[in-house]
Image (cartoon, rainbow, N blue to C red):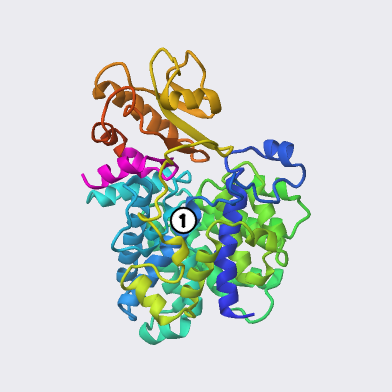
Amino acid sequence: MTTTDKARGSLLGGAVGDALGYEVEFSSLNGILSRYGHPGITDYALDSKGVARFSDDTQMTLFTAEGILSAYQANPEATSEEILKSIKQAYLAWFDTQTAFQLPLPYSWLTYVRDLWARRAPGNTCLSALSQLKDGYEVKNTSKGCGGVMRIAPIGIFYAAHAEQCLMHNSQCIMDFVARVAAGAANITHKHAMSDYSSAFVALLVYRCILEKDTVTRSRLRAITEECLPIAIGVTHSDHNGKRFEELMREAMKLAESDTDDFEAIRRLGEGWIAEETAAIALFSVMRYIDDFERCVVCAVNHDGDSDSTGAVAGNIIGAILGYDAIPEKYKKNLELADVIVSIADDLAGVSDPAQMSRRYADHRPYGIDEKLNFISGMKFTPENITELGPDDIFVFGSNLAGHHAGGAARVARRRFGAIEGQGVGMQGQCYAIPTMQGGVETIKPYVDDFIEVASNCDQNTFYVTRIGCGIAGFTDEEIAPLFRDALKLYNVRLPESFVRILLNQ
């Protein structure tokens, strides 16, 4: 098995575990079993377009990869400080995809991949920390949430593929270097020692498993874990937390080799909302199902807690052990941006075309996946005439407060998409009504603000905003478009092309 195969297996495996767990992230184990039966969810829950969507975990993982690759493209002898500075810049680019207008950034080629602007339940700690950094403030928190560890695998992948070259430029022990870069990357947003330990530990496991030439058996994984633990704990001085972390990892290994059933074992380890529990659940799942990718990720996502993060980390590790070819085809098929993920894995493994590497990580421009990179020119607008909707689509129209849907888009909404006569505001059928006939533009704004709030919390739906207020109500596009400025930040809102062009030119 080649390093490239393992690099692909680790990066794509994490996305698989993430996408499988994303559907049940906020479900209880009882709820999961009631819905899917035993052993829980085993196949993707596809959206209305047949796509298995991943969460912010995979998004941030890809931006971690962009950060480390950009650092080494700029300087093949990059120091840890330069690497972490580049990773921080990549995380700020991801932050803009979640909060800013949908325009590509000059320092991030990933922002040209418009699907990565989708908002997938981003973690509050990541958002708040990056907001502070963007505003020039120091991040101060004591968070040990799993938002640091779930994105860390590319560091282990990269150094496994480039170990010899990195040793030529750095006399420091390579495993110690991996641990410190991984802990530092997590520490950008999460300041608790447990986040440092967990992130260093997972990056080291990925690194060591990729380097293994022989089959990684359960006993071999135990030996690798014993090798990685003291190095991970050594990244910062905190004896109490270090001891607790080591005890939890040993408990995970002990449970994996016991006859305790999966659900009870994971219950004892925690729910995965915090970093050390995510690492423990992932380690347990990998060690228990060391030779079976599917059973490993299924085990990792079916519990009461943070299913997408535990699935993502387990997928990263088991993918590094078994490789890309061991991932069942059903998990490769329909996975969101699977070809982009594999391409980035090749970048991390050092097997991509030099022109691609330079274009992506020096020029920060897209290369090699052109069909996904039409951004503004391929921006999706609300069609002028909508005659049908998909099952998750919402028709947004201008109404009056009385809810008399008699003309224009309102009549279309009533006749075709379930608008309710007498209801002038909000969701109804496959529609959303925004009142536009009760006064000036200033009276419309509160209703538009309410709509944007609703849309931001319904990422499973796509909202098609018509030229509200620009027909019977008598307003112009130039008057109405500015009300929707914040909607440009939402991947799941389509605006009329006239609105978008006005907003982008302001």
From the viewer's perspective, tell me whether residue 2 is left or right of residue 427: right
- Check the image and report above or below for 346 versus 169: above
Residue at (69% x, 47% y) in the render: 41
Q: Image quarter for residue 209?
A: bottom right
* Residue beneath the point at 32% across and 66% down: 86
Q: Is residue 233 left or right of residue 321?
A: left
Tell me, yes or no, if residue 237 can be seen here. no
Q: Position of residue 338 (x, y in %)?
A: 55, 62
Say which element carries label 1: helix
Is residue 496 rendered magenta in the image?
yes
Q: Is residue 117 above or below residue 202?
A: above
> Looking at this view, is 45 or 102 the one in front?
102
On whether residue 21 falls in the magenta region, the answer is no
Residues packed near mark 1 inside 10 Å, few (<14), some (14 to 19) or many (20 plus): many
x 26%, y 47%: residue? 504
Q: Residue at x 27, y 27 (%)?
A: 475
Disc count in the image?
1
Residue 444: image x %, image y %?
A: 30, 24
Q: Is residue 39 visible?
A: yes
Above or below residue 504? Residue 351 is below
Residue 125 at x, y percent in the picture: 40, 45
The quadrant where residue 111 appears: bottom left
Say which amino acid is labelled 1.
Gln
Residue range corresponding to the magenta coloring: 486-506
Instruction: Report x, y in % for residue 428.
Output: 51, 23
Which residue matches tag 1? Answer: 59
